[in-house]
Image (spheres, rainbow, N blue to C red):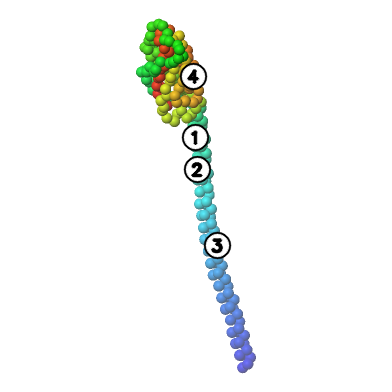
Amino acid sequence: MESALDGQGETTIMRFKHFVVLSSAMLFGVFWTGCEKKNTKELADMQAKLEKEAKESATCQDNASKLKDRLVKLEAALKKIQDQPCVFELDPVTLEVKKRADAVVSSHAGPAKGPPLDLNLVRSRIRGVRSTLKRCYEEAAKRDKSLAASSKTVSLRFTVYNSGKVGNIRLVPYVGGGFGPCVRRVVHTWKFPKFGGYPKNFMQRLHLTPK
């Protein structure tokens, strides 16, 4: 009787052990399958992220290359513009020449003898140097870029002496870039016939306009 009970107990124990082993194997299999599925999903997600980063990197590199080419073209265009001389077009010179008060050479000097000064000769001389004055302004603009900022009007003032020579040449207001000296060199070469009376002061307005 005891022997039979012992045999049944051993059988029960063996069955329990077999059940435990089988259950453990099944649980491990389920766990392993879950881990494998999880790792596969994470791997797929990581691969997708890497592919996305690779595409974005390629796009950035392509955009950087395009921006670099554009920068090179813009720098070349800027250099071309900087190398080109400024060209200015002068408005027509006002042809009206206003005679100012007679210049006083000396408080004791009297008027010179001779015919009066022909004002038409003065007007004609000013008309004849318009292109030269324009060149003076263009050359000045190359030296002084601020002349391109806005238009301006200056007064050219000079004195014609009884001998026919011209002096006391000045520009008001001041214009930079060597414009004043250039204008003075032009006007200083003028020569008129001798005339009577007192030396004559003249003022001519010049309209300087950037093109």
> x, y percentage for residue 193?
42, 7
For disc 4, the neighbor class at 10 Å (few under 14, some 14 to 19, many from 20) is some
For marks 2 and 3 on the same chain, the one whose residue lies earlier in the sequence? 3
Give the left or right position of residue 72, taking residue 209 as reference: right
Return the residue at label 3: 39
Closer to us: mark 3 or mark 4? 4
Return the residue at label 1: 74
Image mark for residue 63: 2
Please state which amino acid type lies under the numbered disc 3: Asn
The answer to whether any part of residue 165 appears in the image is: yes
For marks 4 and 1 on the same chain, the one whose residue lies earlier in the sequence? 1
Q: Are the residues at dot 3 and dot 4 in contact (C-beta closer than 8 Å)?
A: no
Measuring 38% from the left and 22% from the top, which residue is drawn there?
Answer: 91
Secondary element type, mark 3: helix
The image quarter containing residue 191 is top left
Secondary element type, mark 1: helix
**Quadrant of the frame with the N terminus:** bottom right
